[in-house]
Structure formats: structure tokens, C-alpha cells
Amino acid sequence: MEHLITSIVMKLSLPFLFTIIAISLYTLSKGADMLVTEAVVLSEKLGIPKMIIGATIVSLGTTLPETAVSVVAAVAGDASLALGNAVGSIICDTGLILGIATLISPLPLQKEIVNRHGWIQFGAGVLLVLVSIPYSNIGIIFTKGHYLPRFIGFIFVGLLVVYIYLSMKWAKDSQNNYLEDELEEFEHKEHSKSQFLVIIKFVMGIALVILSSKILIPTVKETALRLNVPDSVIAATLVAFGTSLPELVTSITAVLKGHGELAVGNIIGADILNVLFVIGTSVSFAKTGVFVEPKFFKLYFPAMLFILAVFRVGTILYKKELKRLFGFILLGTYILISAISYI
């Protein structure tokens, strides 16, 4: 699909490109608005906290296209792309997106849910690093790298199934503990909306966000090339930024609409799925496993663990909400990691 969009975009004139960018930005915002609105309605109808909805259904929807692309790359023999994409997305989601969201408005924390899913988020990152190390000859990781064997992919997919099962179980427990007055107030306002219609509009919101992102990034990239923006700048910004655009728009929209806990859940869930879903399925489809280059051990793995640790410490220290100061810390950490990667 991306190749088709790119080939079409390359034939268009500059005014048409600007028009497509404007339309894509509009549909992207409308899709995100619909996604967040219906996610909140679904949360209320099911009696499930918005943070759990964000960590499961919303994050699953926003990472699904990324998984599809990674699986296709793995089948074509380029599974390493999935590894870089997933690790880079975790760093970007946790540092850049969550940092920006927190700067816009302090993010409310539901401690039990954040701690439970947050430790899984951190544990998934640690597990990825641990299974990538050749313990018989650890010294080679910084010079020759190592292969992530195919069976690890199957283990990750198995853990994904366990995570989804536990999330459903926790959601049911949360549903039983849901506040009656909130349900009564919601039912009074939203009784006319059928659950089926809510799900349809929710899926449409996800589809609009994903499709708009897929059209927007190649169009902006082509426009930048026409305006003589250097390739290095394009690669460092648009390409890396593009894969996390659905999470970014969804999270910021959620914060602006007063549903910050949905944004927190979305990022935590996306990080977990990037390891178990994106990498798990990609490695499973790669016939010879995935080569982990030395740069992952030198920079990307330490950077991923560091930013996940910073977020974990923040959620432990702050009792009720993530403050704007913490947003500066997350964003600063992301900028520092990006600067080091260029050096």
C-alpha cells in the first residue's frame, strides 16, 4: 500500500501535495477525535476504566498496521526492520509522545492499573534484551551482534496471548468494582447509543487515523524532497516520526478532551505490543531468525531500558498524576537519546 501511495504522490504537482497534506491532517484529527470519543463511550458502557481500554483495544488498533508491515518485511527476509521499528517506537512513544502529552496537561494515574501494566511494559523490554544475548560468548554482542532465534518469536506470541487473557480478566474485575454513580450518570446521557454502533464508529476512527497517517507521511516526504530538504533530515524526522503518528495523535487528542488516563494506557499498551506483538510475529515468520546488530547493544537497548525505567520511577513517585515537570524529564530524555544516536 505504501509503495502505491508513494508512486501516486510522486506524480502530483506541489499545490496538489499541499492540498493532500491539509486534507490528511484534517481527517487524521477527525479520526483521532472519533477514536477517543468512542473509546470513552465503550469504556463507560462496559464499565471498564479508560486506562485499560487504552492499554488494550486502542493500542492494539494503533499498532496493528505496524505489525502487518513488519510481518511482510519478515517474510521478505528483512525482519531486522521490525526490530528497529519496534525498539524505536518504544523510545519515541514513552519519551516523545508521553512527554508532550504530559506537558499539555498533567496525566491522571490509576495506580493499581498503571503499576500492573507498567511492570509488564518494563518487563517486556528487559525480556527482549535478555533473549538477545548469547550467554556462551557475551563479548561478541558489541562487535558482531547476535541472532534472535525463531522460537523466541513463538514464545513472545504465547506471552501475548497470556497478556490479552490477563487484561480481559483484570478488565472484568475492574468492571465489578466500577462506581455505580458513574454508570448511572452515563446511562442517563448515553442510553440511546447501541454498543454495536459504538464499536463500528470506534473501528472507523482507528481506520481514519491509520489511513490518514499512511497518506500523510509519504506526501510530506515528497514535498520535503521538492523543497530540497536534506535526506538525512527527512530520515531522522519524518520516517521515525511516521511510525508513531497514530499513537501521538490519539494520545494528544485524548489529553485535550480530558481523558489523560486513556493516553497513558495507550502508550503502555503500545510498548508491550511492540515487543510481544510486532517483534513476536515478525521473528516467528522469519525463517532464520532476526539479526540483532551491535548498535542495538551499544545504544538502542540501553536507551529503551533507560527511558522505560524513567517512566516506571515517575509512576511510582507520583501518586495521583504525572506532573508537567515529569513531561520535561521524559522529553529531555528522548532528546538526549536522539542526540547520542547522531553522535
Image (cartoon, grey):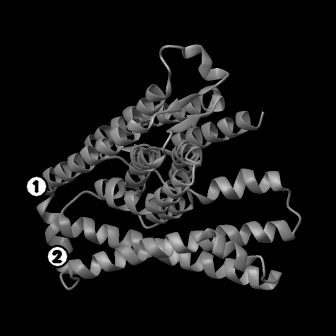
Q: Quadrant of residue 220?
A: bottom right
Check the image and name the residue furthest to the right.
228
Q: Quadrant of residue 122?
A: top left
Q: Is residue 94 above or below residue 39?
A: above
Look at label 1 and name its amino acid. Asn
Residue 219 placement, left or right of 276: right
x, y percent for residue 226: 86, 71
Q: Any mark on residue 176, and which?
A: 1
Quadrant containing the N terminus is bottom right
Residue 10 placement, left or right of 116: right
Query: To which residue does mark 2 refer?
Result: 187
The answer to which of marks 1 and 2 sits earlier in the sequence is 1
Q: Is residue 101 above or below residue 29?
A: above
Residue 140 visible in the snapshot: yes
Residue under the image location 61 percent in, 27 percent down = 145
Residue 332 placement, left or right of 169: right
Residue 234 placement, left or right of 320: right
Q: How many marks can you see?
A: 2
Look at label 2 and name its amino acid. Glu
Q: Nearer the viewer, residue 308 or 258?
A: 308
Q: Are marks 1 and 2 in contact (CB under 8 Å)?
A: no
Residue under the image location 27 percent in, 48 percent down = 161
Q: CA distance from mark 1 to mark 2?
A: 16 Å
x, y percent for residue 241: 63, 56
Check the image and name the residue furthest to the front.
287
Residue 107 visible in the snapshot: no
Residue under the image location 56 percent in, 31 percent down = 301
Q: Nearer the viewer, residue 142 or 99?
A: 142
x, y percent for residue 112: 25, 41
